[in-house]
Image (cartoon, rainbow, N blue to C red):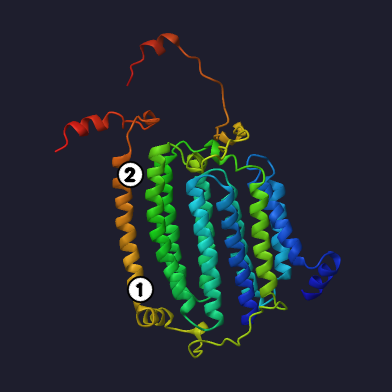
Amino acid sequence: MNEAALLVNFLIVGGLLFVTGMVGFLVRRNLIVMFLSAEMMLQGVSVSLIAWGRFHQDLGGQMLALFIIAIAAAEAGIALALILMLYLRSQTLDVAFWHDLREEGQPPYVDQGIPETHREEHKWPRLTPSGVRPEVDQEEQMHRSRV
Amino acid sequence: MSEWRDQLLQMLPGSSLLVWAVVLGGLGLWFRVALLDRPTALFSRILGLLSLVLLGFWLPRFGGWAEQVTFWLLASVAVLTAGTAISTRSPVYMAIWFALSLLATSGLFLFQNAQFIGFATITVYAGAIVVTFLFVLMLAQPEGDAPYDRVSWAWFSAPLALLAGGVLLAAMLLTFSPDGPGRPDASLGPVVPPSALATDQHHVARLGGELYSRHLIAVEVVGTVLLVAMVGAVAIVIQGKSAYVPGRQDGSRIRGRRDAPSASSGGAP
C-alpha cells in the first residue's frame, strides 16, 4: 500500500468534512445545527490526525484524536446547558434572536422574507380506500355507547 | 484506469480536475444551503456526485481494488451524508444524517487500523452526543419545522462561506497533492521506531500503554476538564433558572410553567 497516497486521500476526506462543517456553521441559524456542524469540523480534524499518525508510524495522532473526543464531550455538555438556558429566555433556537447583543448604532438584522413551508412535505401515508363505505345508521350512532 | 484519467484531464480545460471538482461541489452545496426552500435537490445532488467523481479521478491511487473500493465507499458516504446533514431543514434529520456520517468516519478510522478511536467515535459521538442533542431538540423544538430552519442569513452569507471553504480546501489540496510543495514524504520520519503498526496484533494494548506513559499528564488534565465541564453545566443550569423570570417575555408558551413558580416560591423552605 502506497502510504503517501493513502495520506493524501485521507487528508482530502478530512478537509472536505472540515469545510462542510464550517459552511454549515456559518450558514445555518439553528443553534443545535450549528453545534453539530462544529462537531463535524472536529471529525474532519480527527481524520487528518489519524492519517498523519499512520503515515509517521506514531500513535500521537490517535492520542490527539482521543483527546478531541473527550473535549468534544465536555463541549457538548456545556453547549447543551447553554442552549437550554438560551431557549428558556428566548423561546426560540434561532441565533438571530440574539442580535440584541450587537454594538450600539448597528442596524438590527431583519429577515428578508421567510419562505412558506411546502404543504406536500407534510404528507402522511394513506391507505387506499377499498370496498364501499358502509351505510351509517344515524340512530345507532346516537345511541351507541361510548365504550 | 490511468488512461481514462488522462483523457478526462485532456477533455476538461482549466488547470486541473481539482478546480472543477471544488467548483462543482461548491455550486451543489450552494444550491442546497443558500436556497433551503427551493426544489433544487436533484440538481444539487447531481452536482455533488459529479464533483466527488472528479475528485476521485484526481486522487492518487494507493492500493489494490478492494482497498480502493472500500475507501471510496466509506469516504463518499461520509462526505455526502455530511453535505446532506448541513442542508436538511429539519434538525432531527440533520442529527440523524450526522450520525450516519459519523458511522462512515469511524469506518475510515477502522480502515486506518485505529480500532479504539473508531469504536470510541461510535459510542461517544453517535451514541452519546448526537442522542443528547436529539433530547435537547425534543425539549426545545418539539413541533419541528421552524421558520429559521427554512432561511439562511442575508443573501451573501452562503456564497461567502462556500468561497472561504473552497479556498481553504483548494489551498490544502494543492499543497498536499503529489506534486505540490507540501507533498508527504517520510523525511520527518517516525517518532518511535516503525514496528509494523499497520499489522499490529496488540494495537489497543499499545495504545493504552502509550496513553498512560507518554500522555499521563494530558489524561489527568482531560479528566479535570471533563469534571469542570460537568460542574459548569450544572452551574449554568442553576444560575440560568434563577435568573429566568417566567412570564416576563413570552413565558406562556411554556406549558405548565407559569403557575409552578407561585407554588414553589410560597412554599420554599
Q: Secondary structure at mark 2?
A: helix
- Chain letter for mark 1: B
Q: Amino acid at mark 1?
A: Val
Q: Position of residue B56 (x, y in %)?
A: 70, 67
Q: Please tell me in which quadrant of the rendered image residue B231 appears.
A: bottom left
**As drawn, B246 above or below B11:** above
Q: Position of residue A122 (x, y in %)?
A: 56, 34
Q: Position of residue B249 (x, y in %)?
A: 39, 31
Q: Which residue is mark 2?
A: B240
**Residue sitting farthest toward the top:** A139
Q: Position of residue A107 (x, y in %)?
A: 57, 38
Q: Alpha carbon of mark 1 to alpha carbon of mark 2: how far?
A: 31 Å
Q: Quadrant of the C terminus of chain A?
A: top left
Circle nearer the viewer, 1 or 2: 2
**Residue depicted at 72% across the width and 54% down the height:** B47
| Number of marks | 2
The answer to which of marks 1 and 2 sits earlier in the sequence is: 1
- Chain letter for mark 2: B
Q: Quadrant of the N terminus of chain A?
A: bottom right
Which numbered tag is attached to residue B219?
1
Q: Nearer the viewer, residue A73 or B120?
A: A73
Observer able to see residue B107: no
Q: Amino acid at mark 2?
A: Gly
Q: Residues within 10 Å of mark 2 (few under 14, many from 20)?
A: some
Q: Please tell me in which quadrant of the rendered image residue B252 appears.
A: top left
